[in-house]
């Protein structure tokens, strides 16, 4: 089975801190994604990457950056955490460049910014 | 803005009944369509994919696609309490990423 592992299940950070969310997949997938999920708003795409060192902005990239130095690892960085970034963050990967076969999601990181 | 719409629910059905979940999408060029199930506090898991018009069956689940009407649905036969979850519709409008609907919360009553 494809595994997508997110390093933290729950995280509490202070306003202004730099926050790193890590995601690792073990199936050699080219494509990796970061979403946030909020009640009433659904899943919103922050950034995605289709290759090492490549990144593309999603629908809500402001306040975030990403890093993909190795194929299996995709990191989401909150440059200066704010309370409106309190959310569930979901990492996903897929093998197909056009999304065929769907995503495999990690278990999620619930981030609270205080 | 590419959109995917779903009735947020909750949709309540008795155990053993058919649950019908609906989704409409705005991008006529969309090519692939997916249904995910998300239990409370868990991440979404893929349950069905469909790419061409018509029905696709997998066990108790049937996905239906009508591209002309820009409509995709999920039927769950013989609904069980364990099917109680939020069901997310996802559409690939082209490229590597998806647009997700807000989800429909399904409650199957014993």
Image (cartoon, rainbow, N blue to C red):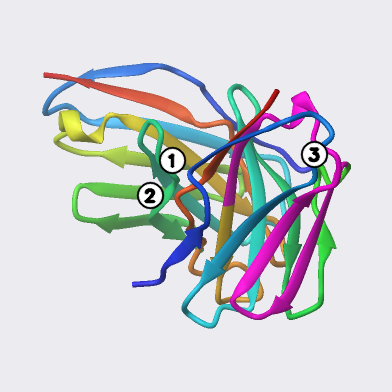
Q: Residue at x 42, y 36 (%)?
A: B87
Q: Are the residues under badges 1 and 2 in a single subunit?
A: yes
B99 to A66, vertically: above or below = above
Considering depth in this image, is A18 or A69 the residue closer to the camera?
A18
Instruction: Label 2, secondary structure: give it.
Output: strand
Q: Is residue B7 left or right of residue A87?
A: left
Instruction: Label 3, secondary structure: give it.
Output: loop
- According to the picture, the residue beneath numbered tag 2 turns out to be B63
Quarter of the figure that contains the C terminus of chain B = top left
- According to the picture, the residue beneath numbered tag 3 turns out to be A17
Chain on which label 1 sits: B
Which residue is most to the right? A62
Quarter of the figure that contains the N terminus of chain B = top right
x and y, in percent, of residue A63 in the image: 87, 42
Q: Nearer the viewer, mark 3 or mark 2?
A: 3
- According to the picture, the residue beneath numbered tag 1 turns out to be B73
Q: Is residue A95 left or right of residue A35?
A: left
The quadrant holding residue B97 is bottom right
Q: Residue at x 73, y 79 (%)?
A: A51
x and y, in percent, of residue B17 in the image: 17, 27
Residues drawn in magenta: A63-90
The quadrant holding residue B12 is top left
Contact flag, marks 1 and 2 (Cβ < 8 Å): yes
B91 to A111, vertically: above or below = below
Packing grade of label 2 (10 A; few <14, some 14-19, many >=20) is many
Q: Is A83 included in the stretch rendered in magenta? A: yes
Marks 1 and 2, Cα distance to the nearest angstrom? 6 Å
x and y, in percent, of residue B4 in the image: 64, 38
Q: Is residue B55 left or right of residue B28?
A: left
Contact flag, marks 3 and 2 (Cβ < 8 Å): no
């Amino acid at each position: 089975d494809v595994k997508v592992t997110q390093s933290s299940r729950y995280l509490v950070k202070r306003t202004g801190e730099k926050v790193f969310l890590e995601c690792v997949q073990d199936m050699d997938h080219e494509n990796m994604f970061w979403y946030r999920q909020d009640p009433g708003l659904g899943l919103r795409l922050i950034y995605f990457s289709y290759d090492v060192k490549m990144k593309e902005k999603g629908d809500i990239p402001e306040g975030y950056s990403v890093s993909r130095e190795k194929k299996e690892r995709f990191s989401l960085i909150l440059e200066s955490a704010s309370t409106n970034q309190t959310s569930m963050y979901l990492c996903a990967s897929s093998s197909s460049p056009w999304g065929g076969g769907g995503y495999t999601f990690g278990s999620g990181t619930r981030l609270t910014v205080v | 803005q590419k959109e995917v719409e779903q009735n947020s629910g909750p949709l309540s059905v008795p155990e053993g009944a058919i649950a019908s979940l609906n989704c409409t999408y705005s991008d006529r060029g969309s090519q692939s369509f997916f249904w995910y199930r998300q239990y409370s506090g868990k991440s979404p898991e893929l349950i069905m994919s469909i790419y061409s018009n018509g029905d696709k069956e997998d066990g108790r689940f049937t996905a239906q696609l009508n591209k002309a009407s820009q409509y995709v649905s999920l039927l769950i036969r013989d609904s069980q309490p364990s099917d109680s979850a939020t069901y997310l519709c996802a559409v690939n409008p082209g490229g590597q990423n998806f647009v997700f609907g807000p989800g429909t919360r399904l409650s199957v009553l014993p």
